[in-house]
Image: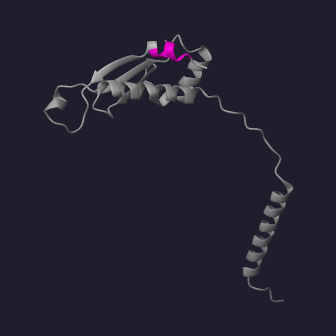
Amino acid sequence: MIDEKAILNELSFKAIRSSGAGGQHVNKTSSKIELNFNVQESEALTISQKEQLNKRIQTRLTKEGVLIMQCEESRSQHRNKAIIIQRFLEFIKTNLIEDKERILTKTPKAVIKKRLTNKRKNAEKKANRKPPEIS
């Protein structure tokens, strides 16, 4: 389906200081990882795969067509990098799965009959609410 090694070579990573509470050490380390992947300039994806990704993940892309993902779960930069790579690959694979075409089926006769009987009952119920006509 996709060549993972070729895609991994196209990724760029940036280490950033993680947000949140921490001690003195948090001001010195950059454990948060930011992953950047340019969908348009990717050579590992086919044209149709690029179009499908652009259509599906349009809201996650920047104006330049770059996908940005971040991870700051762990205190270790290496662990965060492994987590974000795994998430990225799963994200790409799930968004490249093609949807099955829905096959239209005929409405069963029992369903039509049930709908019509319920409709008739409802009409009778409302008709019974009216005051009787005195002639």
Query: Residue, x 62% and y 18% (percent of image)?
Result: 48
Question: Is residue 109 in view?
Answer: yes
The percent coordinates of residue 89 (x first, y second) are: 49, 25
Q: Is residue 17 magenta?
A: no
Report the residue that reaches farthest toward the top.
43
Query: Residue, x 86% and y 56% (percent of image)?
Result: 109
Query: Residue, x 55% and y 24% (percent of image)?
Result: 53
The percent coordinates of residue 92 (x first, y second) are: 52, 25
Depth check: 36 or 111 in front? 36
What secondary structure characterizes most of the magenta part? helix
Which image quadrant: the C terminus?
Answer: bottom right
Q: Is residue 6 magenta?
A: yes
Report the residue that reaches farthest toward the left.
24
Question: Is residue 64 in view?
Answer: no
Depth check: 67 or 82 in front? 82
The residue range painted magenta reads 3-8
Tell me if 89 is positioned left or right of 119 in this view: left
